[in-house]
Image (tube, grey):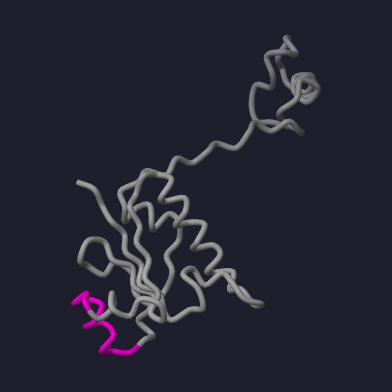
């Protein structure tokens, strides 16, 4: 089943809100997260209240939410259900809503105190190990 994420933005000067002299960093982050989601193969549709009011009027769940006021925007829909209301979700939340697995990249091995050959040799000298390449018997540094 293919998931479509639909974003119903408040009225903004352009489709993403990242234009003009004072750009909201939250909108920049969200635009980048949406681009990333699209690159993962997820269909994303975005509607701006000032440019596409018809989409708001013809989507029943959005029309109903707007009866409570525009502070419910942005609305993030998955299918025909509201998943997030009144805030732009994080990339991890967007991925979860779309069923995309986010792979965490492991940090590179340390090259400082405990990671280098010199540190292993120094630590081995202070341990009971006769082989400096074997490293310390317990702990590090």
In-front residue for pair 95/10:
10
- On the image, the x and y values in percent for residue 103 come to 45, 40
Residue farthest to the top?
Answer: 131
Considering depth in this image, is 65 or 51 the residue closer to the camera?
51
State the image quarter where residue 24 is shown.
Answer: bottom right
User: Which corner quadrant holds the C terminus?
Assistant: top right
Residue 27 belongs to magenta span: no
Residue at 76% in and 33% down:
113
Residue 51, horizontal then vertical, whole percent: 40, 77
Horizontally, residue 58 falls left or right of residue 91, namely left
At horizontal 65% and vertical 31% (from top left) the residue drawn is 109
Where residue 32 sits: x, y (%)?
52, 57
Q: Percent position (x, y) of residue 14?
A: 50, 73
Vertical order, 113 against 57 (above or below): above
Q: How many marks?
A: 0
Q: Quadrant of residue 58?
A: bottom left
Q: Residue at x 34, y 74 (%)?
A: 85
132 lies left or right of 44: right
Magenta residues (range): 58-69
Residue under the point 66% across and 77% down: 21
Which of the 4 image quadrants contains residue 34? bottom left
């Amino acid at each position: 089943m293919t998931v479509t994420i639909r974003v119903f933005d408040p009225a903004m000067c352009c489709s993403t809100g990242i234009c003009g002299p004072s750009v909201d960093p939250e909108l920049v982050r969200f635009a980048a997260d949406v681009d990333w989601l699209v690159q993962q193969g997820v269909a994303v549709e975005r509607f701006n209240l000032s440019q596409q009011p018809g989409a708001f009027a013809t989507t029943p769940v959005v029309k109903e939410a707007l009866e409570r006021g525009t502070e419910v925007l942005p609305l993030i829909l998955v299918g025909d259900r509201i998943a997030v209301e009144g805030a732009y979700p994080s990339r991890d939340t967007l991925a979860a809503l779309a069923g995309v697995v986010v792979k965490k990249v492991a940090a590179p091995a340390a090259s400082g105190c405990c990671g280098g050959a010199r540190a292993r040799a120094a630590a081995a000298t202070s341990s009971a190990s006769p082989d400096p390449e074997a490293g310390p018997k317990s702990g590090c540094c």
